[in-house]
Amino acid sequence: MRLDKYLAQSSGFSRKEVRRFMKAGEVVVNDIEVTDPSIHVGEDDEVYLSGYPVDAPGDKYIMLHKPLGCVCSNDDGTHPTVLSLIDLPRAEELTICGRLDVDTTGLVLITSNGKWAHKITSPKHKTGKLYQVTTADPIPEDAVEKFKQGLMLHNDKERTKPAELTLTASNEAEVILTEGRYHQVKRMFAAIGNKVEELHRARIGNIELDEYLEPGEYRFLTEEEINSI
C-alpha cells in the first residue's frame, strides 16, 4: 500500500495533511526518514508519524448499543446519528449494517468492510435479527402461526417472509426476521390489529448485544463474532 494511503487510513489525517508531515520530516519508516508518499509499505514495516508508531490499517467491526432518539444515518439535521457516537478517525465513512428507527433501541453493527455489511443486510443471506417487542394490547396465540405464514403489510405487494414469533408475556414477544422491510416489526403487529410500544434489537445472526454496553456505548467485535457472519 502507498505510504500516504497507509498513513491516511490509519491516522485519520487526509493525504494532503500526511504529505505535509512528510515534508516536515515527521514520517519515519524502518528508522529512515521518508518524504516520498508513493513508496509502498506493508504490515511488517515499522511506521512512525511525529514520533508515534502507526499500526497497519485494517477493517473495523463495531457493535453499538443504540439509544432512543438517535438515527442510523450518516447525517441528520434533527437527531444525533449513531456514527456521531463513534470516537474514531473518519467514523463518518463507516457503514451502518441495517437501520433502526429513531424510537428503537438495541444492537447496531458498524464496519468499514462493505462485503461483510452486505452479508448482514442482504435478504438472500437470511441473517436472522432478533427483536424484543412490547405491545399496547395482549398478543393472541394465533399470531405465532400468522407470523410463520407471512403477513400482507399495508402498501406491500408480497407477504413477508416467514418470521418466528415467541410469546414471552401477554404483551411481550420476541421476533426473528430474515428481511428488513421499512418499519417491518411495527407494521406486522399493526397487520394483526396491535401496536408496538417498545422495540429493541438484541441479536443479529449469532452476535448478541453485549449486556455490559450502556445505551450509546460501543466496542469492537471479537474475531469469533466477525467470523460468525
Image (spheres, rainbow, N blue to C red):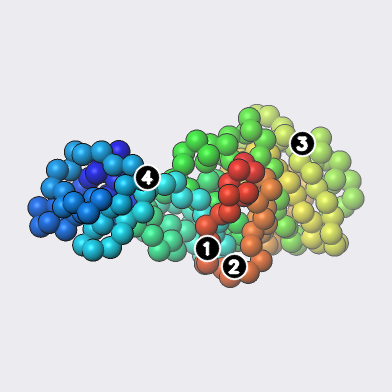
Q: How far is the residue under mark 4 from the one under mark 2?
A: 32 Å
Q: Bin the neighbour count of mark 1 within 10 Å (Cα to Cα): few under 14, some 14-19, many 20 and up.
A: many
Whether residues under marks 3 and 4 lie with C-beta atoms below 8 angstroms apart, the answer is no
- Measure the alpha-carbon separation of dots 3 and 1: 31 Å
Disc 2 secondary structure class: loop
* Residue 12 image position (x, y, % from top left): 30, 55
Q: Are marks 1 and 4 in contact (CB under 8 Å)?
A: no
Location of residue 10 in the rendering, given as x and y in whole percent from the top left corner = 33, 52
* Residue 40 location, quadrant: top left
The dot on residue 162 is 3
Q: Is residue 19 visible?
A: no
- For the residue marked with disc 3, what is the amino acid? Pro
**Which residue appears at 79% of the width and 44% of the height?**
164
Callout 4 amino acid: Glu
Single out the residue that lies furthest toward the right. Answer: 141
* Residue named by callout 1: 218
Query: Where residue 29 sits: x, y (%)?
Result: 23, 50
> Can residue 53 be seen?
yes
Q: Which residue is mark 4?
A: 43
Q: Quadrant of the C terminus?
A: top right
Of 13 and 78, nearer the camera is 13
Query: Cα distance, mark 1 to mark 2?
Result: 7 Å
Q: Amino acid at mark 1?
A: Tyr
The CA distance from mark 3 to mark 2 is 31 Å
Q: Which mark is residue 213?
A: 2
In primary-sequence order, the first of circles 1 and 4 is 4
Determine which quarter of the picture holds residue 44.
top left
Give the residue displayed 40% in from the left and 51% down from the top.
74
Residue 223: percent from left, percent from top: 58, 49
Q: Residues within 10 Å of mark 2 (few under 14, many from 20)?
A: some
- Tag 1 near tag 2, CB within 8 Å: yes
Asked which secondary structure carries label 3, the reply is loop
